[in-house]
Every structure is written in C-alpha cells, then in structure tokens.
Amino acid sequence: MSMNSQPGFGTSSNRFPQNSQPLGLWQQVGSGPQVPRSPACPPAPVPVRTTAHRSATGVGNAVLLLVAALVLAGVGVLLTMMLGTSALILCGILALVPLTICILGIRWIDRWDPEPRGALTFAFFWGAGMSVAVTLLLGPTVTELLSAGFSGAGSDVVGPVLQAPLLEEVAKGLGVLILALSHRSHFDGPVDGIVYAGTVAAGFAFTENILYFGAALTDPAGIAGLVTVFVTRGLFSPFAHVMFTAALGLVIGLAVARRRSAGRLGGAFVLGLIPAIAGHMLWNGGLVVLFSDFFSFYFLVQVPLFLAVLLGVIALRRAERKVTSQRLAEYAGAGWLTEQEVGMVASPAGRTAAMAWARSVGAADAMKRFIRTGTRLAFVRQRLRAGHGSTSDGHLELQLLENLNSARGRMIAAASARRMW
C-alpha cells in the first residue's frame, strides 16, 4: 500500500490506515475466545524522521532519573547521620507499611493503562529525595518569611499549617510537572496525573515518615510515642500526602487531555497547587484551628475527604474505559480490529475472559501485550482526535498497530500448537 495515497495519516481524526485484508475471519479454538484466522498485514513502515528527537528525549529522561537517584542517595546519607544506622533501619521498616498501602492503591488506580516503570521510578525518587531535600534546605527560610508576614501567628501554626503545605506541595508538584513535559507519550490525562502525583507523594511520605518515626524514638515517651505516631500516620492516614498532590496531578492531567503546550501546563501547575496546598493546610491545621479531638477531626473531615477522592477516582477509571472502547471501535470500523477484540481490551470482563483463555493455550504474555498495546493505541488516537498529538504520534500509531498484529500472531501460533497436541 502506498502511504502517499493517505496524506496526513496519524494527524487527522477522520483518516485510518486501510488493511489489504480486513479482519473478521474467525475460528473457534476450544471453548475460549476466538482468534483471527488470518491477521491483517500492517501498512508499509513510514520512515520515522523523529529518531534523533526521541533519542535525545530518552537520554534526557535517563539524566533526570540519575539526578533524582543521586539526590535520594544524598538524603539517605543525611538520614543516617541524623538518626544513626540502627534507628534508620527500624524507622525504614516501619515506613514501608504505609508505603506499601499507598503503592497498592496507586497500582489499583493505574491498572487499566499502566505507566512505564522508568517514569514511576523517577516519580518515587523525586518524592523521596528531591522533594525532601528542597523542603529541608528551604524550610527554615520560608518559615522565617512567613513568620514575618504573619507576625500574629505562633510557630505551631506557621510551620505545619503554612510553611509545610506551601513548600512541600511546590516541591512535589515540580516532579509531576517534569513528568508531564518529559513523558508526553505516556501522560494522557487526569488518571495518569493522579498516578504520577500519587507516586511522588508516596515517596515523599516514605522519607518524611522515617523522620517522624526517628523523632518519636528520641521523645521521652520512647517506644510508646513511636507506636502512637506510627498508628496515626502509618495506619490512620497513609494516603494523606497522596491525596494532596493528586489534586495537582488531576489538574495537570486535565490540561494535558486538552492541550499540551508548555504554557498551559505551567498554568495548570499553578492552578493545581491551590487545592493541593488548601487540602494540606486543612489536614495539618484541623487539630490546631478547627478541632481539639483527633477522632472527631478524623471521622468528620479526613474519612469523608478520602471517600470523596475514592469516588472521584472510580469515576475517572470508568471514563478511561469509555475512551478505550470508543477509540478502538473506530479501528474496528476501519477493519483493524474485530468487535470481539475491542471487548477483549475495553472491558474488565473481556480482559478477564481473554486472559483465562490465553493461559489455557500458553499465550498469556502475548495476550497481556495485546491488551496493553490496544489500550495505549486508544489513548494515542484520543490525543490525535483532540488535536494535540505530537509529531511522532502518527508513527507511534502505526507501530502500535504493528505490535497488535505481532501479538495476535503469537496467540494464533500458540493456539494452533495446542490444537495439534
């Protein structure tokens, strides 16, 4: 097929690649899902003119990850000097409990369209290292400035209620903004923003919890004080930082879903800081300004806020599934996918059934790749339809279609081999 016959493919919402042999020829394999008898041939590869740009982006992302890792290592050395090796190990083990709770929650949010591990690793390193370093370095200066501006406020208000929310959310949010600018092909909307922001915040909370647990060890209350801090921070409110920064990630994600210009993302960053800082101030200041009893504050404010966030995330996850179904249906209409394949990728029940069948014929890895590739293809198509896809998205769309055919072929081969036996 001559690509010249389809000018602008990959940049117009009304154009599709056309198959030389349409899909739709099916055969039943055992009692499981159907697979194509004859997979479609992908179009001739388009010469990619953005290789140098993509290579430079990859190097830039690697440099960002390395810098974040080095800063995290420096923070680790500082914590060792502050707490001592034994206390650091004990507090680190305790801090793993709320971290695990947060990571499991973030993975549940990210389950539909998982983000690349490299980007998530950078997010965690930034939160646990760079954000903490910025807070420790600038905290005293910011506290002095705020104390001068709010001369009537005591130190118990300026620190936790003003300085911490302002400085910490800016430090964490910068990591989310960097990810939105540096990982554009994997930052598609509000759910991605929440996932990246939540990972940054989980990293920050991990290091901060080590500091709090270490401080509790030196308190006259000793182990009893440590248990109290662990229960209140690690078990009662492990998602606190995640919720604050997720508000910023949501706003940046909404901006990404509409247009990706640096100016718009910068404006979204500033706008997203407002709910992030406000939520942090409310959380930290509740017992100082509004309540005198922890449990009243916890059940009247913290729990309802967490439930509201949970309901919002569930609604966003459903929106992701809807986008996946709509965009893949367009490929099915053009002959690149069958309706059954759309269901395999775009519905939880379809994914479950497809994976069960794939395991029965030894094609689980291929099916997992097919589902993930199809989901990513849907969001690439969504960017193109919205008119803010990058110059490489058209080439990426072709590559993902080719990857779908490759995964489909592997499933067919596995199913055929199983039938022969």
Image: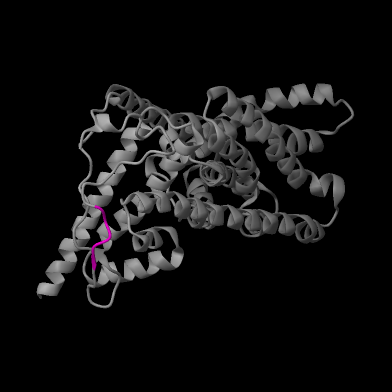
Quarter residue 355 falls in: bottom left
Quarter residue 119 falls in: top left
At 46% from the left edge and 42% from the top edge, which residue is drawn?
382
The spot of residue 46 in percent (x, y) is 24, 31
Q: Is residue 98 visible?
A: no
Q: Is residue 405 above or below residue 123?
A: below
Extreme residue in the right direction: 152
Using residue 118 as the reference point, say whether residue 319 is left or right of it: right
Q: Is residue 364 above or below residue 147?
A: below
Colouring chosen for the image of the structure: one colour
Q: Which stretch did the figure color magenta?
A: 22-26
Extreme residue in the front direction: 5
At 32% from the left edge and 54% from the top edge, which residue is drawn?
337
**Which quarter of the image is occupied by the C terminus?**
bottom left
The spot of residue 229 in percent (x, y) is 66, 54
Using residue 257 as the reference point, say whether residue 64 is left or right of it: left
At 69% from the left edge and 22% from the top edge, which residue is drawn?
141
* Depth order, front residue of 6/265: 6
The spot of residue 260 in percent (x, y) is 52, 29
Extreme residue in the left direction: 420
Q: Is residue 55 visible?
A: yes
At 59% from the left edge and 43% from the top edge, which residue is drawn?
208
Quarter residue 275 falls in: top right
* Depth order, front residue of 23/368: 23
Main structural element of the magenta stretch: helix, strand or loop? Answer: loop
